[in-house]
Image: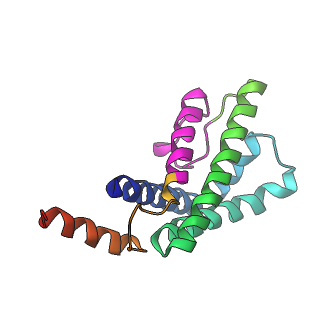
Amino acid sequence: MRLFFLLCRLGMATVFLVSALSKFSDLEAFAISISRYRLLPWASVHPAAIFLPGVELAISIGFFIGPGWRRAASWISVFLLSVFTSAILISQYRGLNLECGCFPSEAMSSPAGWTKVAINLLWLGAAYVAGLDFPNRSANTIQESLMESCAEERDPL
């Protein structure tokens, strides 16, 4: 069970880190992606394109440090994923055919459709689980958790 909690944390941290770095690498493409959803006023698009990758980077870092930060990162990621999923649902309702904007690079882009909604719901579950405490645990960081997991595998007693 500990491994499941740990994998959720590592998965969420990795996804948000890769997402933030890819958006920071091409802020203009990300701003264009945001504008295509037609949800924000034009004046808010560029500030959002700068703000969101910063929040994603903070979330990623939060998953790597102590339990208080991890819980905050979990709840903020649940909120962000809910907003992103809502934006996709609104675009589907409007009949817009968009790329999701999760990763602005052409190689990593995917359509903002029902499949993306399902994937986001799975990520929402992982984000929630990533913020939970390990049952009967004493480790507070990913590094301590990894060390405990490795010790348990080597020591059969």
Q: What stretch is highlighted in magenta?
A: 99-128
Magenta stretch: helix, strand or loop mostly = helix
Q: Residue at x 78, y 26 (%)?
A: 94
| Between 107 and 132, the one nearer to me in the picture | 132
Q: Position of residue 36 (x, y in %)?
A: 74, 40
Q: Please check the rendered image and state whether residue 75 is part of the magenta-colored stretch, yes or no.
A: no
Up the image or down, 52 lies above or below 98; here it is: below
Q: Which residue is drawn at 83% across and 48% down?
A: 40
Up the image or down, 96 lies above or below 149; here it is: above
Q: Position of residue 21 (x, y in %)?
A: 52, 63
74 relative to 138 in the view: left or right: right
Q: Residue at x 42, y 62 (%)?
A: 134
Q: Where is residue 23 in the image (x, y as percent from the top left)?
A: 58, 58
Residue 5 seen: yes
Q: Please check the rendered image and state whether residue 101 is part of the magenta-colored stretch, yes or no.
A: yes
Q: Residue at x 53, y 45 (%)?
A: 125
Residue 111 seen: no
Classify the position of the C terminus by image quarter: bottom left
Quarter of the rendering containing residue 5 = bottom left
Q: Position of residue 76 (x, y in %)?
A: 65, 60
